[in-house]
Amino acid sequence: MLESTRAVFELFVQWCVLLLEVITVCIILFVTIKSLINFIKKNEFYLYLLKGLSLSLTFAMSAEILKTVILEDKSELLILAATIGLRGIMSLLLYWEMKNHEI
């Protein structure tokens, strides 16, 4: 009973992770295309692109955090921690870039 419940829970978490990753890709594609159109029209695009990438990183980090729920061993945890750390650093760099661009 417990094993089947865990299997259902793991499947649910995997589907949630997949949904968050699809949302991440959709945001990146939408923001990139809209920024490209604004660039061609000579409109401001840089800040919009940074905010969109920051939003997509938030969804990607949410997916990574959800993955921690279904980890099997410690080696996976180290890889996941490194991924979350890199995405966190990228998020901070995007935030810093937005702050400098607004000034």
Image (cartoon, rainbow, N blue to C red):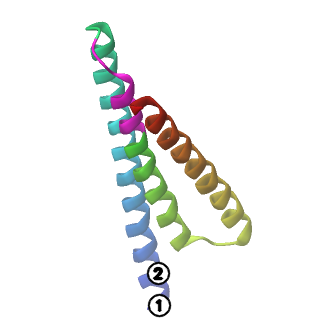
CA–CA distance in space, label 2 to label 1: 6 Å
Q: Which mark is residue 6?
A: 2
Name the spot of residue 56 as percent of width and height, x first: 40, 44
The amino acid type found where label 1 is placed reads Leu
Apparent side of residue 16 relative to residue 63 in the rendered image (left or right): left
Q: Nearer the viewer, residue 5 or 79?
A: 79
Residue furthest front in the image: 103
- Per the rendered image, the range of residues in magenta is 43-53
Other-residue count near label 1 (Cα within 10 Å), few / some / many at <14 / 14–19 / ≥20: few
Q: Are discs 2 and 1 less than 8 Å apart at CB?
A: yes
- The residue drawn where x is 31% and y is 19% is 44
The amino acid type found where label 2 is placed reads Arg
Q: Which mark is residue 76?
A: none
Name the spot of residue 78 as percent of width and height, x first: 71, 63
Name the spot of residue 32 as percent of width and height, x first: 36, 25
Residue 99's quadrant in the figure? Answer: top left
Quarter of the image that includes the N terminus: bottom left
Q: Is residue 60 magenta?
A: no
The image shows residue 58, relative to residue 95, as above or below, that is below
Name the spot of residue 49 as percent of width and height, x first: 38, 29
Quarter of the image that includes the C terminus: top left
Residue furthest right in the image: 75
Q: Is residue 51 magenta?
A: yes
Q: Which residue is under mark 1?
A: 2
- The residue drawn where x is 63% and y is 59% is 80
Q: Secondary structure at mark 2?
A: helix
Apparent side of residue 93 relative to residue 20 in the rendered image (left or right): right
Q: Nearer the viewer, residue 26 or 93?
A: 93
